[in-house]
């Protein structure tokens, strides 16, 4: 397995900061907001009441009931408590599904750019990742024809996210409908829809592919609390799945980690059952930052930037700079560029190669506006050095 590129870059940034450098980290997908007070209070109250024991492997009944209601309220998806599995983060939910379904030789279609861990989890299970790539001119949205061309008699699973990490792209109802028109003819293919960024969506509404009757009985919807509720350190994710898949994931999780922390789950149930106003306020803040960040990045020569419609990332094409050199250092690819920016500008970003898009870099705008402005200023300065060298040479 490859090490997670986002975690690796974040640690490199921390190491550099420990040496006394003022590093701006735009590498990790973590809201800078604190967990809302009423959620923290619910966890503390659960602890005070002695809610500190083992929990059922698929989650407490109270939380699973809250998740069933959330799916019905927000996504028009109908599940029973027996179809819900709560895990130690959405990453474990995804891993559970892949381990339950994939055997040696099975193909798993990944919509690229994709989140870094999809590919490695598929490889861990013995599957073969099949990358279907959309570029910036498509706003990183896969077409129905691209999907159809990738499906074979060995395809067992497709995985995608909406809103997407790393691109911020959102699949609309019409986008999903066109994909379903293809998938309805492949009854043995399971669809895994990662919707962890659901609440950070700047379009009119969020659409779930599991709503379509043709495929709802073979769609797994993944979600969690880290992004929409600023609960990254709480490590809570969940799935709604066909009963046979949920049962398999329950069995796998029971042997690997068992149930998630008891007081965390008590607080998570409160999060889902309470007002989402703090979440909506956070989304508004991210949208404001997105507009500022996209405008600033678009002013950098050679920087191809689209306008993401969800999550908190910008994923520009920076291939214009490949092949350029400065002070004897050649920028051959996005990996070189990410390292150059960290070492020379002290701005931590992530190379697009980790996401299946070698020509891009990922920048998170889950940071204060002042940090975003300073980061762009530093990048501009280093970019200009490359441009000046190119013109002079």
Image (tube, grey):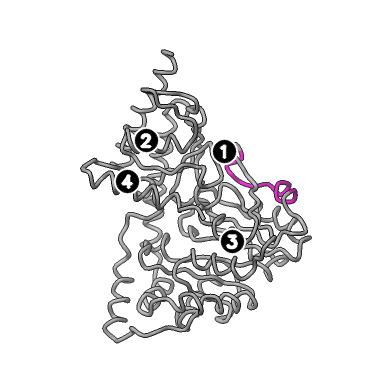
Find residue 118 and report its horizontal and vertical position in percent: 55, 57
Under circle 3, the secondary element is strand
x 41%, y 63%: residue: 226
Mark 4 to mark 3 CA distance (whole Å) = 31 Å
Q: Mark 4 points at which residue?
A: 13
Q: Going by the image, does 386 lie left or right of 175?
A: left
Residue found farthest to the left: 20
Q: How crowded is mark 4: few (under 14 residues within 10 Å), some or many (20 or more)?
A: many
Mark 2 to mark 4 CA distance (whole Å) = 11 Å
Residue 168 against residue 58 in the figure, above or below: above
Mark 3 to mark 1 CA distance (whole Å) = 21 Å
Find residue 78 and report its horizontal and vertical position in percent: 61, 74
The answer to if 126 sits in the magenta stretch is: no
Residue found farthest to the top: 392
- Viewer-nearest residue: 97 or 182: 97
Q: Mark 1 points at which residue?
A: 136
Q: Mark 2 points at which residue?
A: 341
Mark 2 to mark 1 CA distance (whole Å) = 22 Å
């Amino acid at each position: 397995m490859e090490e997670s590129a986002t975690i690796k870059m974040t640690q490199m940034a921390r190491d550099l900061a420990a040496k006394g450098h003022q590093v701006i980290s735009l590498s990790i997908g973590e809201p800078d907001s604190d967990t809302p007070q009423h959620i923290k209070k619910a966890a503390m109250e659960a602890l005070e009441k002695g809610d500190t024991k083992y929990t059922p492997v698929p989650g407490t009944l109270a939380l699973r009931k809250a998740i069933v209601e959330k799916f019905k309220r927000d996504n028009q998806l109908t599940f029973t408590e027996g179809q819900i599995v709560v895990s130690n983060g959405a990453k474990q939910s995804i891993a559970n599904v892949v381990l339950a379904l994939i055997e040696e030789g099975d193909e798993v279609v990944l919509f690229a750019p994709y989140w870094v861990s999809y590919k490695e989890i598929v490889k861990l299970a013995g599957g073969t990742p099949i990358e279907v790539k959309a570029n910036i001119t498509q706003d990183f949205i896969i077409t129905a024809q691209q999907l159809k061309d990738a499906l074979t008699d060995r395809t067992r699973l497709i995985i995608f996210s909406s809103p997407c990490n790393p691109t911020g792209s959102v699949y609309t109802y019409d986008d999903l409908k066109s994909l379903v028109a293809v998938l309805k003819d492949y009854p043995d293919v399971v669809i895994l829809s990662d919707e962890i960024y659901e609440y950070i969506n700047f379009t009119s509404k969020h659409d779930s592919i599991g709503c379509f009757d043709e495929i709802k009985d073979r769609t797994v919807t993944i979600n969690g609390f880290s992004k929409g509720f600023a609960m990254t350190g709480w490590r809570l994710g969940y799935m709604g799945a066909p009963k046979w898949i949920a049962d398999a994931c329950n069995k796998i999780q029971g042997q690997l980690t068992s149930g998630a922390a008891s007081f965390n789950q008590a607080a998570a149930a409160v999060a889902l059952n309470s007002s989402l106003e703090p979440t909506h306020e956070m989304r508004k803040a991210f949208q404001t930052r997105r507009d500022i960040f996209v405008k600033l990045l678009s002013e950098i020569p050679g920087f191809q930037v689209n306008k993401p419609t969800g999550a908190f990332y910008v994923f520009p094409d920076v291939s214009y700079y490949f092949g350029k050199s400065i002070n004897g250092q050649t920028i051959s690819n996005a990996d070189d560029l990410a390292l150059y920016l960290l070492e020379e500008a002290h701005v931590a970003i992530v190379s697009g190669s980790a996401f299946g898009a070698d020509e891009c870099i990922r920048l998170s705008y889950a940071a204060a506006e002042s940090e975003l402005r300073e980061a762009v200023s530093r990048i501009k300065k280093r970019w200009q050095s490359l441009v000046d060298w190119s013109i002079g040479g």
